[in-house]
Amino acid sequence: MSPVSLVIPVLDEERALPQLVECLAKLDPPPAEIVAVDGGSSDASKDIIRAAGWRLVDAPRGRASQINAGVATASKESVCVLHADTIPPTDAIAVIEKVLADRRVALAGFTPLLCGEKIRWGTSFHNWIKTWYAPMLFRPHLFLRGVRLLFGDHAMFFRRKDFLAVGGCDQGMPVMEDADLCIKLARLGKVRLVPRIVRSSDRRIAAWGPLKANWIYLKVGAMWALGARKRLAKLYPDIR
């Protein structure tokens, strides 16, 4: 059996979940378990999760608290945090196992391609290059050690014991908990971007437009890096 647990934070994702359920059923090899962590959905998300046969966990709303609850519940050595609107490749579990077989790697993630009615090549490229330039600008000492900043769309994965050892995600952070986790896990080893595509929803770009979306991404990232974190939630509202 695979040593990989998938943890999926969920909040009002009835539109995205059917496609994810279908795609995860095709993973080869399959994950050992799928843990969906609901943050108080008011739609049909829980019904879809139960019908899929996934384990359902309730947690306080917020990606950090939901991820922490999911990892705490997970029973396997390796954990991948997958957003409900992100579709992994069919061999994702094998990729995770191969990457984490290198004990020097503490955290890794796939390469996201933002898609909807069309592929958002420009923003996808920006997200890819941001993995390098963000730590180069704001954490140069870590960049020189090979650290890359990954985000939720990367479908990040790690060893459960390492996540617990660094205290998991900071539940006081409404957003950017993923980048913060990169900094924590960088103490234990490399943070690696894997050159394999996951397809992630472009719903924020569709709602805001490409220019506004990229400006928000830059502003939120800079404010996080400079320590002005209390205002981040207002700048980065939920889009469903």
Image (tube, rainbow, N blue to C red):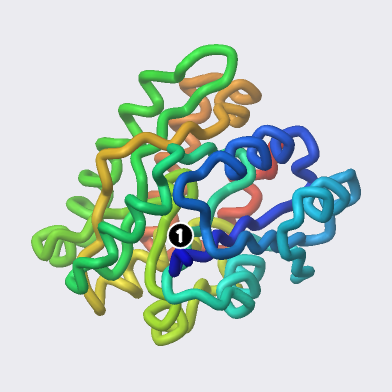
Q: Which residue is mark 1?
A: 178
Q: Is residue 103 left or right of residue 227?
A: left
Figure disc tally = 1
Residue plotted at (89% across, 44% down): 43
Residue plotted at (25% across, 40% down): 195
Nearest the eye: 83 or 147: 83
Say which element carries label 1.
helix
Q: In the figure, 108 relative to 122: above or below? A: below
Image x and y of residue 81, in percent: 51, 58
Q: Amino acid at mark 1?
A: Asp
Q: Is residue 39 left or right of residue 9?
A: right
Q: Is residue 91 left or right of residue 69?
A: left
Furthest residue to the front?
1
Q: Is residue 19 left or right of residue 76?
A: right
Image x and y of residue 40, in percent: 83, 59
Q: In the figure, 202 relative to 12: above or below? A: above
In the rendered image, which quarter is residue 72 located in?
Answer: bottom right
Nearest the eye: 55 or 161: 55
Image x and y of residue 34, in percent: 62, 60
Residue plotted at (13% across, 66% down): 141
Residue plotted at (17% across, 71% down): 104
Quarter occupied by the C terminus: top right
Nearest the eye: 218 or 19: 19
Image x and y of residue 46, in percent: 84, 53
Q: In the figure, 80 relative to 122: above or below? A: below
Nearest the eye: 53 or 47: 53
Around disc 1, counting alpha carbons within 10 Å, would you say few (fewer than 14), some (14 to 19), or many (20 or more)? many
